[in-house]
Image (cartoon, rainbow, N blue to C red):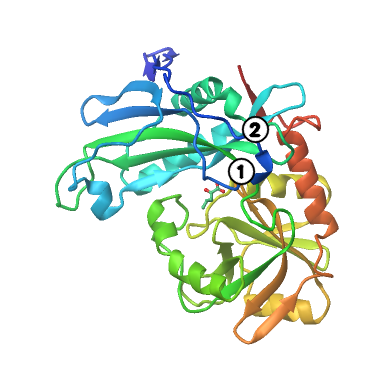
Amino acid sequence: MIFETLSRRFYIMLDIKIELTKCPKEKPTDESKLGFGKLFSDHMFVMDYTEGQGWHDPRIIPYQPFSLDPATVVFHYAQEIFEGMKAYRTAEDKILLFRPDCNARRLNDSADRLCIPNIPEEDFIQAVSTLVSVERDWVPHSADTSLYIRPYIFATDVGLGVHASKHYIFSIICSPSGAYYAEGIDPVRIYVEDEYIRAAPGLTGFTKCGGNYAASIKAGELAEEQGFAQVLWLDGVEKKYVEEVGSMNIMFKIDGKIYTAATVGTVLPGVTRRSCIELCKDWGYEVIEGKLAIADIMAAAKEGKLEEVFGTGTAAVVSPVKELKWKDETAYIGDGKIGPLTQKLYDTLTGIQWGKLPDDKGWTVEVK
Ligand code: COI
């Protein structure tokens, strides 16, 4: 919470009440079987919003279901947003968050578009850090595992009129997780979607709202039936330019340069995307954020210039792509194995996140 006077800005920390569970769950013994987002920790964070009163009653309580009226706005009109973050355990048993300020800002950008009240960045970071601190024993120990953190806000007014709700719940849950894809860091096959679209100018493509993902499920299911891990979305107007993949942003290394869609309203501004761009630039690569036609990518593949393709996302980390199928054309990337830049990005990013490499950029925040 922030108070401003004429000359000073005061930050008052949230007074988070903590109620610990009396029935702690068994922690997973075999961390190689964690999968992604299947198992949840003992506690959750909850805070309520009431118009006129603002956010109130921040609390950490035992993980439990919500009791909601069947006419609650979120069930009918999907006024909901979320974030994805991770907590990492270092070899010294420190627990680190990665760029939580970026998630705090993006949540508020999503909130603005969905008419949901903002959460002050400091409050968001305090809520995440306090919950992770309570759940620190749930941060897994094995390589390539982490505690996936899911902050989300949903509308809780009761009634069937379409309007911005006057009541909301902000909650955070945690899930000890392994790799997002069953393939792990093995390269995946991607289907370029040319019928359905994910976003169009003026819509919600840049936000992390549940509705974006709901609208993507059909195409994802059809692609999966054909053995593809995810779909690559083209722009919603001309179906010509690449935008993003189901759960991640996507980058192409063509003839030594890195290309990715600009985040101009229809593409999610990914925290991993942004971090990879910064690293690539540090390493001397030219990174072009703009319009890249799928036809040019397929042509580059034919000319042997499509060197690497990889997705970036919190859940997916850095995920190599070995094949792109668009209409009746297929591009095979490299020799089907993870490329050197993709591997270097994966190693550097995860090295910083797990505290194995120095964090020269100050990206990590320790949870005490
Ligand atoms: C994330 O990468 O954190 C996401 O939110 C993507 C999600 C669909 C798994």
Q: CA distance from mark 1 to mark 2?
A: 9 Å
Query: Total of numbered circles in the picture?
Result: 2
Q: Tell me the number on the disc at residue 140.
A: 2
Q: Quadrant of residue 300?
A: bottom right
Residue at 38% across, 17% down: 4
Left or right: residue 276 versus residue 313 is right
- x then y, percent, for residue 245: 58, 62
Residue at 45% across, 40% down: 107
- Decide: marks 1, 2 in contact (CB < 8 A)? yes
Q: Amino acid at mark 1?
A: Leu
Residue at 39% across, 17% down: 19
Residue at 35% across, 46% down: 80
Q: Secondary structure at mark 1?
A: loop
- x then y, percent, for residue 246: 54, 61
Left or right: residue 135 versus residue 277 is left
Look at the picture and state if 101 lies above or below 252: above
The residue wearing badge 1 is 34
Mark 2, Cα crowd under 10 Å, few <14 / some 14-19 / many 20+, is many
Q: Amino acid at mark 2?
A: Pro
